[in-house]
Image (cartoon, grey):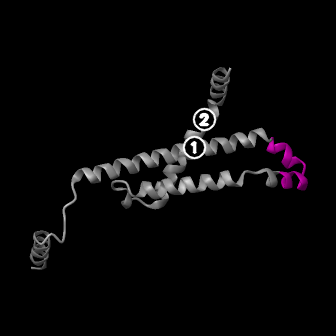
Amino acid sequence: MSKIKSKKKILRKIEKNEVRMIPKWKFEIKNKSLRGLVILGLVLSSLILGILVYWWQLKNVGELLVMGEVGVEVLLRLFPYWLAGLFGVAMSFCVVLWKKIDNNYRKPLEKIALMAALITIIGSLIIILTKDLWELRLWLWLR
């Protein structure tokens, strides 16, 4: 009985132009743009993580840590906190947007965060492993 009443209420509101139907293409554009933003965020996160690992290798952190308290102090002073913060913001952005795509609202947040982290780690590993190729191309291009 209540289903029929609610259907009639909705139909009356549609007839009075209080409620409008939204075209399907608007939902499709929203979904595609969210996917694009998630992919862009994951690529950005991978780049930032790759840069952080490259910084870690460049500063010879292992040698700094051997120096004891002074080495740790130097490491803490030199660490790019803004880059780590940017990485956290980008990952949070990706997880929140990923949750809004399609049927992902049904999946637990931990599962989505884990998938985003795995994709970011794999992407940054690819960047790190191909670093020499990128440096060579950049050197040839600047030459």
Which amino acid lies under the numbered mark 1 shown in the image of this protein? Ser
* Residue 99: quadrant of the picture: bottom left
At x 25%, y 50%, the residue is: 25
Q: Is residue 67 magenta?
A: yes
Circle 1 residue? 46
> Which segment did they paint magenta?
60-74
Quarter placement of the C terminus: top right
Residue 119 visible to the viewer: no
Q: Give the camera-side residue of 26 and 56.
A: 26
User: On the picture, is 105 further left or further right than 43?
Assistant: left
Q: Local crowd at mark 2 within 10 Å, few (<14), some, or many (≥20)? A: some
Q: Nearer the viewer, residue 3 or 85?
A: 85
The residue that disc 2 covers is 127
Main secondary structure type of the part rendered in magenta: helix
Q: Is residue 2 magenta?
A: no
Percent across and percent down for residue 44 are: 55, 45
Amino acid found under the numbered disc labelled 2 = Ile
Residue 55, by quadrant, is top right
Place of residue 38 in the rendered image (x, y in percent of width and height, measured from the top left): 45, 49
Where residue 109 sits: x, y (%)? 46, 60
Q: CA distance from mark 1 to mark 2?
A: 8 Å
Which secondary structure, mark 1?
Answer: helix
